[in-house]
Image: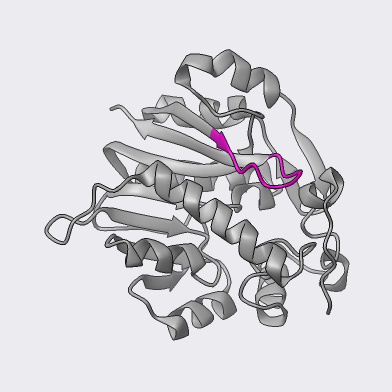
């Protein structure tokens, strides 16, 4: 199928509008079909963008993600990073190139098969967000544009709690959902909450949840919301949220 470039807020919010109706079934079936049928960027990126648009979209997100993780890794002491919902491995490979030790998993076997074929350093597995287990804690867990594609609240909460359980003390969970329109940090929590206070469902397979919902799940587990950073890409209102384990 041919992608069409959209620049409107509605198009950027609903990244399944050009594909969702062609693949009925449950979530696993949908993502298996999407990863099988679309290229390595559109399948895990934005189906409303053409190839150049997705190239820019991935690059913008990666640059911001790397700035949030920082440059503390070294050959002698690499950061242990988990890419939860890795798709075809774009971000996992980039993080491995930066010297981090990367585990990555996705719910879709076709996506993981593609990621393994690309190699590049990460160790890949097939799992849902609430299924992944690890013998060691991670310094960083990233989950890019995955959680708002989980429409069921119980599954969303179970996945979020499982990711939180994998992070060491002082480690960070970096997730994406609707973000405020300006770069902000923990000192501006009120501004963040006001800008993202409503639950919205712009697409059949998209549920954007407010920061308060994430905090309600994560704060009792010892993770504090410490930073919000929007993508700043066209009309996309999504951005990164960083939660740091304090206990």
Name above or below for residue 223 compared with residue 59. Answer: above
Q: Residue at x 80, y 42 (%)?
A: 201
Quadrant of the rendering where the N terminus is positioned: bottom right
Residue 76: give x, y in percent of width and height: 11, 59
Magenta-drawn segment: 229-237
Q: Is residue 192 left or right of residue 131?
A: right
Q: Is residue 66 left or right of residue 190?
A: left
Q: Is residue 247 left or right of residue 15?
A: left
Regarding residue 14, the answer to whether it shows in the image is: yes
Regarding residue 164, the answer to whether it shows in the image is: no
Residue 79: give x, y in percent of width and height: 25, 53
Question: Is residue 7 covered in magenta?
Answer: no
Q: Nearer the viewer, residue 68 or 244?
A: 68
Q: Nearer the viewer, residue 117 or 154?
A: 117
Name above or below for residue 158 compared with residue 35. Answer: above
Question: Is residue 236 covered in magenta?
Answer: yes
Q: Residue at x 60, y 22 (%)?
A: 192
């Amino acid at each position: 199928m041919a992608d069409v470039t959209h620049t409107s807020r509605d198009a950027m919010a609903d990244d399944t509008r050009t594909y969702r109706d062609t693949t009925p079934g449950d979530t696993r079936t949908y993502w298996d079909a999407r990863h099988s049928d679309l290229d390595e960027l559109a399948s895990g990126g934005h189906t409303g963008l053409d190839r150049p648009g997705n190239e820019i979209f991935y690059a913008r997100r990666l640059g911001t993600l790397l700035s949030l993780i920082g440059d503390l890794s070294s050959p002698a002491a690499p950061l242990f990073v988990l890419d939860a919902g890795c798709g075809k491995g774009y971000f996992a490979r980039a993080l491995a190139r930066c010297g981090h030790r990367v585990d990555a998993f996705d719910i879709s076997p076709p996506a993981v098969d593609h990621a393994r074929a690309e190699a590049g350093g990460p160790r890949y597995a097939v799992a849902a967000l609430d299924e992944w287990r690890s013998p060691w804690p991670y310094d960083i867990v990233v989950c890019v544009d995955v959680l708002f594609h989980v429409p069921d609240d119980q599954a969303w909460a179970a996945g979020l709690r499982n990711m939180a359980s994998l992070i060491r003390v002082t480690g960070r969970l970096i997730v994406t959902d609707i973000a405020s329109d300006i770069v902000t940090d923990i000192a501006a929590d009120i501004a963040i909450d006001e800008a993202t206070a409503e639950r919205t469902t712009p697409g059949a397979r998209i549920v954007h949840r407010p920061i308060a919902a994430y905090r309600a799940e994560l704060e009792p587990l010892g993770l504090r919301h410490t930073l919000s950073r929007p993508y700043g890409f066209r009309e996309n209102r999504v951005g990164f949220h960083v939660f740091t384990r304090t206990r």
